[in-house]
Amino acid sequence: MTRAQKIIDRMALEKQISVEEIPKIDLYVDQVIQLFDTGFSEMKRNPDEKILTKTMINNYAKGKLFYPVSNKKYSRNHVMLISLIYQMKSSLSINDVKRVLAGINDKAAQKELDLSSFYESYLEVQRYNGELFKENLEQQVNKVQADSTAFGDDREEIEKVLLIASLVHMSNLYRRAAELLVDEMAGGKES
């Protein structure tokens, strides 16, 4: 098994909360947390890590990252929006996430957008990204291995450091591209 495949196997790339997994009844905050813990448990870096907490959800609500809940219960739409927030917050600021989701929130609250269809499209893009990532990771591993042949006894450590640096660089490039698009949304510019 290649180094890239070992990393991919541990990443649980296919883990998402599908529309079918979201109950058709409204959920209390503890039930939302349980759904995320179950759906994303394989993505934890360590067993003590929390995927989602009451504080996080309350902060998202106070920050108006999703439209108001009714009777302390979260609809399917809320769960889908929380999933989007969960994914975006690791790379974007909370204010950027709010800006990105503002139009989606408004349309979903007014029932002008079928959030299930939007969310399915989002999940399909995620699956596609997973396939691209697998191909790209294999290419990066091969490049790093080729570039580290001259390091002899230190080769394994050098390969890991180079691969980490490469992955961080790619992450930063994608984050910066996302931020440019957020700025365009805020300023009304087109790319």
Image: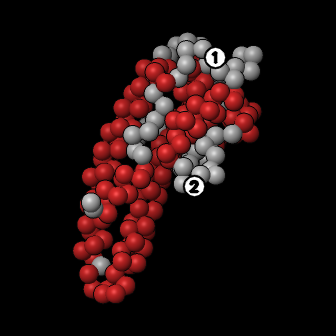
Q: Could you say where residue 168 lies in the image, as x and y percent from the top left?
A: 45, 62
At 47% from the left and 43% from the top, the residue drawn is: 181
Q: Could you say where residue 174 lies in the image, as x and y percent from the top left?
A: 43, 52
Badge 1 local density, few (<14 within 10 Å), some, or many (20+)?
A: many
Q: Could you say where residue 21 lies in the image, as x and y percent from the top left?
A: 49, 24
Q: Are marks 2 and 1 in contact (CB under 8 Å)?
A: no
Residue at which label 2 appears: 46
Give the Cα separation between the discs numbered 2 and 1. 30 Å
Q: Which mark is residue 26?
A: 1
At 48% from the left and 52% from the top, the residue drawn is: 175
Question: Is label 2 or label 1 in front?
Answer: 2
How many marks are shown on the rendered structure?
2
SS category of the residue bearing label 2? loop
**Residue 13 in view (yes/no):** yes
Badge 2 local density, few (<14 within 10 Å), some, or many (20+)?
A: few
Given the image, on which type of amino acid does mark 1 rest? Asp
Vertically, is 50 above or below 146?
above
- State the scheme by which the image is colored: secondary structure
Vertically, is 157 above or below 2?
below
Given the image, on which type of amino acid does mark 2 rest? Asn
Q: Is residue 176 left or right of residue 142?
A: right
- Image quadrant in which you'd find residue 70: top right
Asked whether 3 or 189 is in front, the reply is 3
Give the mark nearest the N terminus, 2 or 1.
1
At 51% from the left and 35% from the top, the residue drawn is: 39
**Residue 99 in view (yes/no):** no
| Quadrant of image for the C terminus | top left
Q: Is residue 121 left or right of residue 109?
A: left
SS category of the residue bearing label 1? loop
Q: Which mark is residue 119?
A: none
Q: Is residue 2 left or right of residue 71?
A: left
